[in-house]
Image (tube, coloured by chain):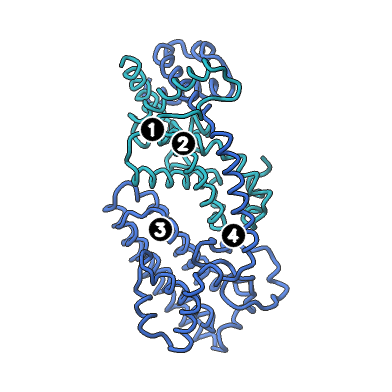
């Protein structure tokens, strides 16, 4: 992606091409982030779309204050998730065909789906902060520094949460495997 | 080895494994003493990474892209709208009539006290915009901005108490906008002011790039920037008052702002202590915007 600052400035002036670039760059990452957070790949689609519509409406208010644009974008996604969870408070629905990739044969797709379902189910045993770190680090592929910006925490605190989150995830995975 | 050192090693291994594409064995060889503890954690991280293969369905992706492009075109087509275009038409008309013809009657009074969850809130915002537009002097506009910023903080605390994170964030942007505007008026005579006055040809100096604090207000249902308008050079907009009057007015405004800054900080901090965790990130942002904004405004008045 071209220089993010100039791209965002163009988007703030309603440059459609710039906005389209931002959309393509972040759409999948935001989708995966939301899926991991709510454990529902279908609901995550609608929430992801809402995040980008909210971004479109409010991008003019974004200001460069030393924080990357992605931190602001993930903040919007985070708020969307919090709102969703507060309103729904419902059981997780089964994952659908979202989990198969184009190159998978049926067996590979089934195995992949099972593996991802286990991880998403295990993720529900993490604290909110641990889930946020694991999601941003491993599904959205943000660096420790970027995660720290998004969460407003120090890098040391994020590393500690990453450690405790992986430990908790491992423990939860062991439990689900034994069930 | 303490926990912090282990956290750093784990993170380094994760970077090598997930970003640089090194194998699990390579990572473990670098830290033989910690290998037993690292191995299960790295395996778990790889499993978590597997969750990143989830993708939206192709038909949803196509539909979402189409909807987004439509919204983008709609917004681009509407960007030439003035400040008023973002209020409901009825609210704008009602506000102008009430302020101009009735001089502010009961409805304006009622709307003035309304909160963002009230049907009259649109009238309140539109009325504020009318008042800003009709206030002739720069000092008057600055005082009004201070008053409006103060209102926004009250609204933030109110909506936080209702647990409405989105409204807290939206009003925080409005607070930021009003404080920015105040800085612009007080600190930068001769620069363009968005969304305040009817369009007029800007003088040459208005063509200069805007200062970092001149970011346009968000395209919410509140204010959308009107075509930028230049304020005449420093001092011209002060209605011909002499320097002593100006200094006295500025000192008064400064006192008001200093008092508002302190009381609003206290209000937001108290809210931060009392509100549920879900609202706290938005409140922290509101507190940061308030503290930074008031500080910049006070600096501009120095």
Question: The chain drawn cyan is chain what?
Answer: A
Q: Nearer the viewer, residue B126 or B168?
A: B126
Q: Is residue A41 shown above or below B225?
A: above
Q: Secondary structure at mark 1?
A: loop
**Labels 4 and 3 within one chain:** yes
| Residue A76, above or below B177 | above
Q: Residue at x 67, y 44 (%)?
A: A3
**Residue of label 3:** B167
Picture coordinates of residue B240 (x, y %)? Answer: 57, 89
Q: Where does label 4 land, which residue? A: B212
The quarter of the image holding the N terminus of chain B is: top left
The reply to the same-chain question for discs 4 and 1 is: no
Choose the circle earlier in sequence order: 4 or 3: 3
Q: Chain of mark 4?
A: B
What's the distance in space between the residues labelled 1 and 3, CA to CA?
29 Å
Residue A25, position as x, y percentages in the image: 61, 39
Q: Nearer the viewer, mark 4 or mark 3?
A: 3
Quadrant of residue A159 within the rendered picture: top left
Tag of residue A42? 2
User: Which of disc 2 and disc 1 is earlier in sequence?
Assistant: 2
Disc 4 to disc 3, C-alpha distance: 25 Å
Q: Which chain letter goes with mark 2?
A: A
Look at the numbered disc 3 and give the secondary structure of its residue: helix
Q: Position of residue B160 (x, y in %)?
A: 33, 57
Contact (CB < 8 A) between labels 1 and 2? yes
Do the residues bearing badges 4 and 1 touch, measured as CB atoms within 8 Å?
A: no
**Mark number for residue A93?**
1
Q: Categorize mark 3 by other alpha carbons within 10 Å: few (<14), some (14-19), many (20+).
A: some
In the depicted structure, whether residue B2 falls above or below residue A137: above
């Amino acid at each position: 992606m071209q220089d993010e600052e100039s791209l965002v400035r163009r988007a703030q002036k309603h440059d459609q091409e710039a906005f389209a670039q931002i959309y393509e760059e972040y759409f999948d990452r935001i989708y995966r982030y939301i899926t991991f957070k709510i454990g529902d790949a279908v609901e995550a689609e609608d929430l992801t779309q809402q995040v980008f519509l909210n971004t479109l409406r409010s991008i003019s208010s974004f200001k460069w204050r030393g924080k990357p644009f992605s931190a602001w974008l993930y903040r919007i996604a985070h708020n969307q998730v919090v709102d969703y969870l507060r309103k729904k408070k419902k059981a997780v629905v089964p994952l659908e065909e979202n989990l198969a990739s184009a190159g998978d044969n049926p067996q590979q797709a089934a195995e992949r789906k099972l593996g991802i379902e286990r991880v998403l189910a295990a993720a529900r045993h993490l604290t909110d902060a641990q889930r946020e770190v694991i999601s941003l680090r491993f599904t959205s592929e943000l660096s420790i520094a970027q995660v720290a910006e998004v969460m407003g925490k120090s890098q040391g605190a994020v590393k500690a949460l990453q450690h405790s989150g992986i430990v908790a995830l491992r423990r939860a995975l062991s439990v689900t495997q034994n069930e | 080895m303490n926990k912090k050192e282990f956290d750093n090693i784990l993170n380094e291994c994760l970077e090598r494994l997930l970003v640089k594409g090194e194998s699990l064995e390579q990572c473990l060889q670098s830290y033989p003493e910690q290998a037993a503890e690292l191995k299960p954690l790295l395996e778990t991280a790889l499993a978590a990474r597997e969750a990143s293969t989830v993708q939206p369905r192709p038909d949803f992706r196509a539909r979402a892209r189409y909807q987004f492009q439509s919204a983008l075109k709609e917004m681009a087509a509407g960007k030439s709208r003035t400040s008023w275009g973002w209020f409901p038409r009825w609210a704008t008309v009602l506000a102008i009539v009430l302020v101009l013809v009735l001089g502010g009657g009961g409805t304006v009074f009622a709307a003035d006290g309304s909160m963002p969850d009230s049907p009259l809130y649109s009238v309140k915002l539109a009325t504020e915009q009318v008042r800003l537009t009709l206030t002739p002097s720069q000092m008057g506009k600055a005082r009004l901005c201070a008053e409006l910023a103060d209102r926004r903080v009250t609204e933030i605390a109110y909506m936080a108490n209702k647990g409405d994170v989105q409204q807290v964030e939206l009003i925080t942007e409005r607070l930021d906008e009003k404080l920015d505007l105040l800085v612009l008026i007080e600190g930068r005579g001769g620069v363009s002011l968005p969304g305040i006055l009817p369009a007029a040809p800007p003088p040459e100096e208005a063509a200069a790039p805007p200062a970092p604090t001149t970011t346009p207000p968000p395209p919410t249902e509140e204010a959308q920037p009107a075509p930028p308008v230049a304020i005449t050079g420093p001092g011209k907009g002060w209605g011909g008052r002499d320097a002593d009057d100006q200094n006295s007015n500025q000192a008064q405004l400064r006192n008001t702002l200093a008092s508002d800054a302190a009381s609003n900080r206290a209000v937001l901090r108290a809210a931060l202590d009392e509100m549920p965790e879900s609202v706290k990130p938005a409140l922290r942002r509101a507190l940061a915007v308030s503290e930074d904004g008031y500080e910049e405004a006070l600096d501009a008045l120095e």
